[in-house]
Image: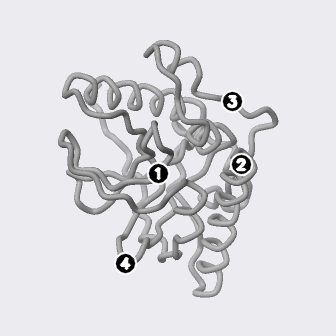
Amino acid sequence: MTDQVICALSDVFARWFAYQAQRGIRVCCPADENRPSPCRYDVEDPERWRPWSRPQPVSLQNIASALECEFHPAIHDYYGHGFAGPVTASFKGLAVTLVQSWNEEDFERLQQNLVAHVLMLRRLKLPITLFLATVPDESRVISLDNETGEVVLEQLGQKKRWVLAESLPAFLQRLSPLPQPAVTPVAPVNLPA
């Protein structure tokens, strides 16, 4: 499964960057010195980014252990191999933005959000899912079903779930790139002295 997830995610990035290049879209994120990332690669144009692979992959085993459960192996591969900026795509007409970490601090925040998500599901006595992507409707999220490994569209806080793909690699392979949204520069914050 590891190679399948990593290959499918790498393919999504390759197709997405090629799509942007074909349309003359400059792939970038606003430069922010408070949010450095190894994804930044162009000193002359610090807004540009590309996916960055960790020299040694990491897992989410620390939070799975803290939650006293096992996470589906696909989630470790999806989040543990590197950093990336926002990638927009379509899944059968549904606009999605893949959730990825931008840097180590973002990865820590991602883990905290996953813990909060799992705790909410437990409190509501719902099966565990692990989020993968956002959709325009903020009351829904695309997640990995922790038990089956299926990718589902779930209504947050409810039992409503629709299976989108039988596995994470199958979901990633079916994504069609969408144009990168317009980038708004980060406005400087003027705090009172």
Neighbourhood count class around disc 1 (C-alpha, 10 Å): few under 14, some 14–19, many 20 upward: many
Q: Which residue is mark 2?
A: 52
Task: Look at the image and tell me in which quarter the C terminus lies.
Answer: top left
C-alpha distance separating marks 4 and 3: 33 Å
How many labels, in total? 4
For marks 4 and 3 on the same chain, the one whose residue lies earlier in the sequence: 3
C-alpha distance separating marks 4 and 1: 19 Å
In this view, 15 is above or below 191 = below
Neighbourhood count class around disc 2 (C-alpha, 10 Å): few under 14, some 14–19, many 20 upward: some
C-alpha distance separating marks 2 and 4: 28 Å
Whether residue 181 sits left or right of residue 63 in the image: it is left
For marks 2 and 4 on the same chain, the one whose residue lies earlier in the sequence: 2
Q: Residue at x 67, y 49 (%)?
A: 39
- For this rendering, which residue is in front, 62 or 163? 163
User: Residue 167 at what x, y percent from top left?
Assistant: 54, 54
Q: Which residue is mark 4?
A: 93
The label nearer to you, 4 versus 1, is 1
Q: Residue type at mark 2?
A: Trp
- For this rendering, which residue is in front, 167 or 41? 167
Q: Residue type at mark 3?
A: Val
Neighbourhood count class around disc 3 (C-alpha, 10 Å): few under 14, some 14–19, many 20 upward: some
User: Residue 32 at what x, y percent from top left?
Assistant: 52, 46
For marks 3 and 2 on the same chain, the one whose residue lies earlier in the sequence: 2
Q: Which residue is mark 3?
A: 58
Q: Which residue is mark 1?
A: 150
Neighbourhood count class around disc 4 (C-alpha, 10 Å): few under 14, some 14–19, many 20 upward: few
Q: Residue at x 71, y 44 (%)?
A: 2
User: Residue 145 at what x, y percent from top left?
Assistant: 42, 43
C-alpha distance separating marks 3 and 2: 13 Å
Q: Residue type at mark 1?
A: Glu
Whether residue 54 sits left or right of residue 168 in the image: it is right
| SS label for mark 3 | loop
